[in-house]
Image (tube, rainbow, N blue to C red):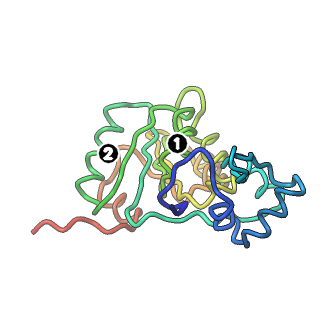
Amino acid sequence: MSFKNSRKSYLTPKEVAELLMVSTAAVRLWAENNDLKARVTAGGHRRFKMDDVQAFAAKKNIQLNIPTSDSPKILVVDDEYDFAEFLKTLLEIEVKDVEVQISLNGFDAANKLRDFSPSIILLDLKMPGLNGFQVCQHVKQNPLYKHIRVIAMSGDMSNIEIDQIKSAGAEACIQKPINIANLIELLSLNTSTTA
């Protein structure tokens, strides 16, 4: 089973090699030297946790080879439930073969990064607890997630806040209420054609 289709707790040496873009021999050598933490199964096979691979990649400054899905995956992060549901429904109608999930706060969003693996995050800037600025920094400073496109959203934002979120790695910041046509164009995804 390839890593692309796998959401397992443990990875094989082959899957780790694909992620790190090296040979399985290099992975085995790193594990033998205790550079890369590994568990050994009852059958004597090495298995690796994604968190350990991620930490190793960050330490060695290796860009992980994260496979992309054929269909776009969008995570809507907004503490306003009705707005998040509206955006989810809209995207499912407007974008071809899209998968959309909702997080109502920054902490849940952090968990969904690993489990859902979105390609795009639509991120509300002003949420209680972990706000959009903090979520964006977490995404963009993490080698495992920094490939994810972040589009920030807010109903009330200053030019300073727009500059801050773009400096944190967001590609755009859009005003609420959302201009739907502009959002779809910004996403640059295949739209559904209904004739």
Q: Which residue is mark 2?
A: 88
- Residue at position x 49%, y 65% from top? 68
- Residue at position x 76%, y 64% from top? 62
Question: Which tag is nearer the camera, tag 1 or tag 2?
Answer: 2
Relative side of 54 to 178, left or right: right
Q: In front: 43, or 77?
A: 43
Identify which amino acid the numbered label 1 is placed on: Met
Q: Characterize the local packing of mark 1: few (<14), some (14-19) or many (20 or more) Cα atoms within 10 angstroms.
A: some
Q: Secondary structure at mark 2?
A: helix
Q: In front: 26, or 100?
A: 26
Residue 51 pos. (x, y %) = 69, 46
- Residue at position x 69%, y 57% from top? 143
The numbered dot on residue 9 is none
Q: Which image quarter holds the C terminus? A: bottom left
As measured in the structure, the alpha-carbon distance from the residue carrying label 1 to the one carrying label 2 is 23 Å
- Residue at position x 36%, y 48% from top? 100
Q: Secondary structure at mark 1?
A: loop
Q: Is residue 27 above or below residue 166?
A: below
Residue 170 pos. (x, y %) = 57, 55
Classify residue 17 by image quadrant.
Answer: bottom right
Identify which amino acid the numbered label 2 is placed on: Lys
Q: Which residue is mark 1?
A: 157
Residue 69 pos. (x, y %) = 44, 63
Residue 41 pos. (x, y %) = 69, 46
Q: Is residue 100 above or below residue 192?
A: above
Mark nearer the N terminus (1 vs 2):
2
Are the residues tagged 1 and 2 within 8 Å (C-beta)?
no
Q: In front: 55, or 181?
A: 55
